[in-house]
Structures are given as structure tokens and as C-alpha cells.
Amino acid sequence: MFHKKIDQHINEALVELGIATPIGIQKKAISSIKSGKDSIITSTKETGKTTALVVALVQMMKAALNDVPRAMVIVENKADADAMKQLFDDIGKHTNIRVHCVYPGPNLLKIRDKVYYGTDIVIGTVKRLNELYSNSGLNLNDLQLIIIDNANSTIKVELFAQIDRLTDIMPNVQKVLLTQEINDKVKRYANKYMPHPNIITSND
């Protein structure tokens, strides 16, 4: 069993993926995210940060609810969005949680229609998420979490204003950063929006 405090259907999906036991910092990362506290989860590649995030969110969401996103995940590019979407599909395969990707390429109106049809988690690049919010009225009134994946590279100087805008929309929601290092850009975001975060490292 991956984690005794995780729902059985999630554990079953993880076993099917060949993930029978937690690795690296996964247990502490899952607990921190589920606690509702702002969290910075830092470790090198291939230590299970993203899997921990997906497990925690599927556990927290449990099932589809209403039509608007409850979690927004900011990623660096299309490849990262698609990879995370696939992980949600695999780990949440025994649930009806709805996950949609938002990135450059597809027509914005088509993306809007998919998201508006019903979304629990929206994953996207910061520019496209801003376009969807500004031009198509993305409803974030029920948002509970803002997550930045690979924050050390996703947060770029030229994107500060757009990342800040998405965060400023819902200042009181839980924030989670997944990062390989706590660099100056990560520190800037944390100092501005995460006054007392849990900091989980691979050394914990």
C-alpha cells in the first residue's frame, strides 16, 4: 500500500502504475499539501514531487463538484501540462475528477468551452491562463489552491506580472510550490505570497 491514509481507489491506481511505496519526500509532501498550509516542496528531479501533488489533490477533491476549477496548476510549457494531465488521468482513474489543460495552440474559445463544461483542476501556462481569465471570464471564485510546478524555472522575470495577477485574484487560497531549488525567483514569490510556508526538502 502506498499510503494507509490515502483512499483505497487511489492506492489501487498507484499499484497499477507500479508505485507501491512512497519514495523520497512523498509522504511529507502529501501531508503538507493536505493540511491546507502553504507549502514549498523542494528536491531534485525524479524524487516524486509531482506524483505527491497529484495524489494529494485527487484525495482532496474526491469527486467532481460544480463547474468551476478548485485548483489551478501553473506549468512551464505544453509538455509539462500534458505530462501532469496524464498523471491525473492515471492516479484518478477510479474517480470522476475533471482535469483540463490550457496552453498555446488550441483555439481559446474551444479551450473555454471545455473548461466551462466542468473542471475541477485546470493546468496551464501562465500566459494562457491569463488570457482565459481576461478574455473569457474564467471563474475562479471556488479556487482553493494555486500550485506552481517546477517553480525554479516556471517563474521567470518576464512573467512576474502575469503570475502575480493570477495570485492576486485569490489572495487567501493555499499556495504550493514544487521546485528543484529555492532560487531568487522562488524566494520573491514566497516572500510576497507565502509568509509562513511549510518547507519540505529531500533531507527531511
Image (spheres, rainbow, N blue to C red):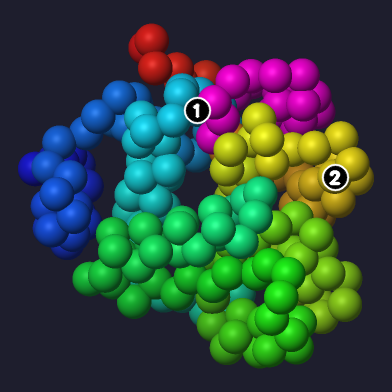
Q: Secondary structure at mark 2?
A: helix
- Asked whether, in this view, residue 158 is left or right of residue 114, the answer is right
Q: Earlier in the sequence, mark 1 or mark 2?
A: 1
- From the top left corner, tell me how far across and down residue 163 is, in percent: 80, 47
Name the quarter where the C terminus is drawn: top left
- From the top left corner, tell me how far across and down residue 80 is, in percent: 54, 54
Instruction: Assess whether residue 32 is covered by the magenta stretch.
Output: no
- From the top left corner, tell me how far across and down residue 160 is, in percent: 86, 40
Q: Decide: few, some or many residues near mark 2? Use Cα within 10 Å; few <14, some 14-19, many ≥20.
A: few
- Asked whether, in this view, residue 14 is left or right of residue 56, the answer is left
Q: As displayed, is residue 4 above or below residue 72?
A: above
The boundaries of the magenta stretch are: 178-197
Q: As displayed, is residue 142 above or below residue 5?
A: below
Hey, what amino acid is under mark 1?
Answer: Ile
**Which residue is disc 1 drawn over?**
41
> Splitting the image into 4 quarters, where does residue 93 fall?
bottom left
